Structures are given as C-alpha cells and as structure tokens.
C-alpha cells in the first residue's frame, strides 16, 4: 500500500500507514510486513477489535523499555532473564503532580513499573532502572516534538 501523494509505502523504514472508514473507529495499521488493528472500546462507540491509540502508545514505550534493558544487560553479561513492564496512562490535574513543572490545567501522566527477573545485584537493578529512562521512545517523548500535517490529494 502506498502513502498517497508521498510515493512511499509501509515497507520504507520509519513509514507507517493507517487507514480507517469514516463509519467507525476501527483502523488498519501497516508497519512493514506487519498488519495491526486499532479501535476504541464498545463503551465509547468502537467495536473493540484492537487496542486503542493510547494502549498502542504505551505498548511502544513498554516494548522499547524492555528491549533496551535486555540489550544493556546482554552487553554487560548480567544475569537478566526477563523484563516485564507495566504501564498506565491517565490525565491528571497539574496541581496534583509535585514533580511536574506545569502547575495549571491537565497533563498526561504515565506510570511505568519495571519488573526484572534474574539474580541481579541491587547496583545492577538500580542501573537498569536508570537505563529505562534512556530508551529511545522515552527520550523522544521527553524531547521537543514537531509534527507536520498536510493534506494529500487522492
């Protein structure tokens, strides 16, 4: 499938194609050779055929965190056996967040809990927790992001 007007397809690195009908929320997502589905739960009018966009967003952060920790541990020859990342997203009042710079309005809040399986020292566990904040998706989310949106002509 080609991205209309851009001459690219979903097999090009960094390209994703998302297509949905105007009659509902279900979306087909093409990423390289992989096809995924996104949707909304029935409680908000979707058909629940896939995770919602925020769930996919958390999945990206969680999978990047897990991959980064495993790669780091392999390089160090540490006895890490498995990584499980639990994530939760919420909108909170900025005034309720002591660690946040923003103090007015609402903001996005992500809880990420990392479970490390293996016989690791406390120092190794602490270092891996520090490395979790250095995964590429985490860094992207903490950096300035510019999104350019334009119409394409079918």
Image: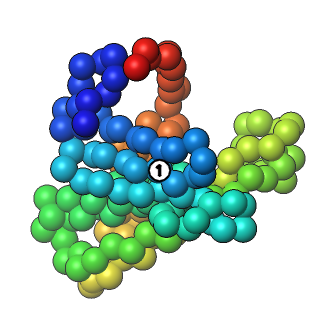
Eyeballing the image, is 95 above or below 16?
A: below
Query: Taking the image as drawn, is residue 14 in sight?
Result: no
Q: Which residue is drawn at the image coordinates 60% and 51% (left, top)?
A: 24
Q: Position of residue 1 (x, y in %)?
A: 25, 36
| Residue 110 placement, left or right of 97 | left
Q: Which residue is drawn at the image coordinates 52% and 37% (left, top)?
A: 142
Taking depth in this image into account, of 73 and 68 the one nearest to the observer is 68
Taking depth in this image into account, of 133 and 136 the one nearest to the observer is 136
Neighbour tally class for label 1: few under 14, some 14-19, many 20 plus, Cα within 10 Å? many
Q: Which residue is mark 1?
A: 27
Eyeballing the image, is 141 above or below 145?
A: below
Q: Quadrant of the C terminus?
A: top left
Q: Dividing the picture into quarters, in which one does residue 54 lie?
A: bottom right
In this figure, which colouring scheme has been used for the structure? rainbow
Taking depth in this image into account, of 36 and 141 the one nearest to the observer is 36
Q: Position of residue 134 (x, y in %)?
A: 38, 47
Q: Which residue is drawn at the image coordinates 15% and 64% (left, top)?
A: 74
How many numbered badges does the structure rendering display?
Answer: 1
Taking depth in this image into account, of 73 and 12 the one nearest to the observer is 12
Query: Taking the image as drawn, is residue 115 in sight?
Result: yes
Eyeballing the image, is 130 above or below 79?
A: above
Q: Secondary structure at mark 1?
A: strand
| Residue 15 placement, left or right of 41 | left
| Residue 49 placement, left or right of 76 | right
Eyeballing the image, is 23 above or below 118?
A: above
Q: Position of residue 17 (x, y in %)?
A: 35, 38
Q: Which residue is drawn at the image coordinates 74% and 44% (left, top)?
A: 107
Q: Dividing the picture into quarters, in which one does residue 118 lie?
A: bottom left
| Residue 152 placement, left or right of 4 | right
């Amino acid at each position: 499938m080609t991205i209309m007007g851009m001459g690219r397809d979903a097999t090009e690195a960094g390209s994703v194609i998302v297509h949905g009908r105007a009659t509902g929320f279900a979306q087909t997502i093409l990423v390289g050779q992989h096809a995924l589905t996104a949707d909304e739960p029935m409680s908000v009018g979707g058909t629940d055929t896939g995770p919602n966009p925020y769930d996919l967003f958390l999945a990206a952060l969680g999978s990047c965190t897990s991959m980064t920790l495993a790669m780091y541990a392999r390089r160090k020859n540490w006895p890490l056996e498995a990584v499980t990342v639990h994530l939760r997203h919420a909108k909170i009042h900025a005034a309720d967040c002591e660690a946040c710079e923003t103090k007015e309005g609402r903001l996005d809040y992500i809880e990420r809990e990392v479970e490390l399986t293996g016989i690791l020292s406390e120092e190794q566990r602490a270092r891996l927790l520090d490395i979790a904040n250095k995964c590429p998706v985490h860094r992207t989310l903490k950096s300035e992001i510019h999104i350019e949106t334009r119409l394409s002509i079918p």
